[in-house]
Image (cartoon, helix red, strand yellow):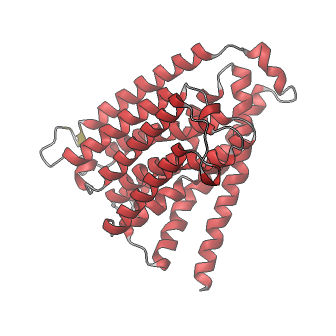
Amino acid sequence: MSAVLIIWFEFGLCAILIGFAGTRLCRYADVIADKTGLSGSWIGLILLATVTSLPELVTGVSALTLANIPNIAVGSLLGSCVFNLAILVVLDYLARGESLYRRASSSHILSAGFGVILIGFVGLNVLLIDKTTLTIAHLGIYTPAIVLFYIVAMRALYIHERAQVKEFVEQVADRYPDMTLHQAYVRYVLSASLVIAAGIYLPFVGAQLAEVMGWHNTFVGTLFIAGITSLPELAVSIAALRMGALDMAIANLLGSNLFNILILALEDIIFVAGPLLTFTSPLHAFSAFSAVIMSGIVIVGLVYRPSTRLFISIGWISLSLFTLYLLNTYVFYLHGG
């Protein structure tokens, strides 16, 4: 019993560290957004999404190089995409008053749309790939396609965000007169380092917890480990919402999903035994298509902007997202053993 308590204590400590540093990470990212003339959406998409997705990268690399468990590597990424979209339900609940989707910028439609394409592309490859798939050295042909499309997506999002910016440095820098851009960068890096350190340790705590609790490996990899590595996204997004940076919070989640797919391509490069997806279960396609449908629901919410809320202060968009998350969890509970 004492060993279990110690593991739970380590888990809680990591979560507290991520929450503490994540709050400051959002503040410094907001300073950078103001003083560079970039919007909160772009900062959330690049600075926050990249940092909060690093635990998924480290977990995947460890699963491939140290443990040789491709299903954990791929499952944690696709499961994280589903979990990130479920975090929007939490944000909608915490955003009192108007619905989250009435207050959010319509610019998120573009990043959500790119997410549909990238995640859906991976889902198709999970279903269709076999031993005779086209390869480049040990890579699947899907890897260069993912990298190329990610670059195209980032370029398109950057151009779109720059076009939306109406206020530049001279007009917005006064929001933080006591902090220079250099100080913001330094403090951002320090806060990000703490988030990364705690996020990197979390998967190992989760693996120990799964062992002592007797959970199935595939279930743990695709749901529990994915949830653990997504804690930085949860902490940072809630912190961004509480400081009034709603668009930064949403962009962090949607951007993390795009970066997760790029991580899958990087993992395929690292995994020298052959195309990574040929060594994984086709069940991962269910997570991919769950994330695709959830992304589509988010796009509908951003376009339709519903004003009504249902029970427990969430709207039908959030209820739909939560239902799909539960369905994905139930399917992996039944068949992921």
Q: Is residue 39 left or right of residue 244?
A: left
Q: Position of residue 91 (x, y in %)?
A: 63, 46
Number of marks: 0
Q: Residue furthest bottom?
A: 1
- For the point 62% across and 56% down, which residue is it? 198
**Residue 335, placed above or below residue 263:** below
Q: Quadrant of residue 45?
A: top right
Q: Is residue 227 left or right of 64 when viewed as pictured?
A: right
Can the viewer see residue 196? no
Residue drawn 65% across the image and 21% down it: 38
Side of 25 relative to 294 (left or right): right
Residue at image position (25%, 42%) is 125
- The residue lying furthest to the left in this view is 132
Residue drawn where x is 66% and y is 53% of the image: 18
Please tell me in which quadrant of the rendered image residue 103 appears.
top right
Q: Is residue 105 left or right of residue 284?
A: right
Residue 239 screen position, x and y as percent: 70, 45
Quick check: 171 above or below 210? above
| Quadrant into which the N terminus falls | bottom right
Q: Is residue 156 visible?
A: yes
